[in-house]
Amino acid sequence: MDTAHGGWILQGRAAPLVTLALALALAACDGAAVGAPRAGDTADAGDTANAGNPGSAGAAGGAGAGEGGAAAVDAAAGSGGSGAGGDGGHGGEGGHGGALIWEPVETDWCSAGWSGLDDHTCFHVPETAARGAPILYVLHGTMAPDALPVGLQAIAAEAAEALGVVAVFPRGRPGLCTWDPSVETSFCWPTRRETVDAAAPALIEAWMSAEALLSRILGQTFGGRYVMGFSNGGYFASYVALEGLVEVDGAGLVGAGRMVIEEHLFSQERPPIYIAVGEQELSSTIASAENLADVLTQHGWEHELVVHPGRGHEIRADDFTRAWETWRPAP
């Protein structure tokens, strides 16, 4: 029943990566794929870096939060895999020809169609993702301690299917929203100079450890790395791209921008940047997006600024599509 294919151990199928069912990652049992999330559930709320801009994560809904799955997975490591992974996951050597024996982590952070790489990192591998697919990090906005990212994960999974990328959804940390006491316990990304300097190295290290583990699980290296952030996550994505906190091939900011930009910290690398805001956003959010675009223009930095007519503080699947076109324009 199991067939080895280019480093994969697949059940009854070959080349494409397989949609990850909650109970069995990296194996499509009888070709079945995870069902699409249900519409109608609420999405996570976002923020601006300094003003706490309220809003929803977009039009798409999602199924209720799902468990990360319980069945063990044999995924051949392959010659292209990275070194041993870091944070989380139940791993070990063994199985078929030195394959990594790994079991998804059960966590409510991962909704339907996503698997837990560790307690605070989910991933989604669509059927459309071929070997060597790019990896896309999706960063949420400010989230209350008891909130779940069902809406944004549904949108991100839809986008991953359309683009053929492996999506990774990490969680921010409490204590990084420093502009208002009401959000001190919320899960956030750092958006001020002092918090970026203090917290970003550990966050990026956790991302890279998770990426290394995922590379071992999938038995492949990734064909590019991208980051897409909504609201608070978009502000942090700007630091990642502008200052080269980790090498990315493109960055996207939705419902975000930058007012204070330390141009002397600009990275030598210049990944293309997609910036989008809604026409009905707070004026401060629109101004920060326009300011970032102006600075990028002055530096000849490739970017696109989109103001969505009739939209508020939200992210939709077409933002991912337009970002992709900015990052990887057609020849």
Image (cartoon, helix red, strand yellow):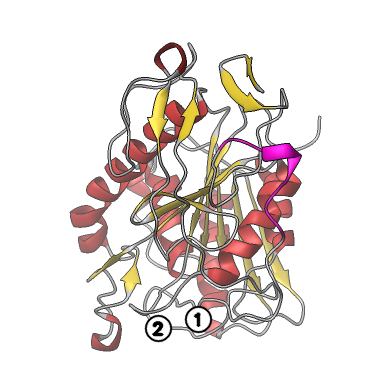
Q: CA distance from mark 2 to mark 1?
A: 8 Å
22 vs 94: above or below:
below
Q: Is residue 253 above or below residue 200?
A: below
- SS state under label 2: loop
- Dot 1: element: helix
Is residue 245 found left or right of 181 in the rendered image?
right
From the top left corner, tell me how far across and down residue 6 is, in percent: 62, 14
Q: Is residue 132 magenta?
A: no
Magenta-highlighted residues: 26-35
- Residue furthest to the front in view is 1
Amino acid at pointer 2? Ala
What residue does disc 1 label? 284
Q: Which residue is mark 2?
A: 51
Q: Quadrant of the C terminus?
A: top right
Residue at x 60%, y 55% (from the top left corner): 113
State whether residue 26 appears in this view.
yes
Q: Amino acid at mark 1?
A: Ser
- Looking at marks 2 and 1 on the same chain, the residue that comes earlier in the sequence is marked by 2
Please provide percent x and percent y for residue 100: 40, 25
Q: x%, y% of residue 133? A: 62, 31
So how many labels did they put on this image? 2
User: Do labels 2 and 1 touch, CB within 8 Å?
Assistant: yes
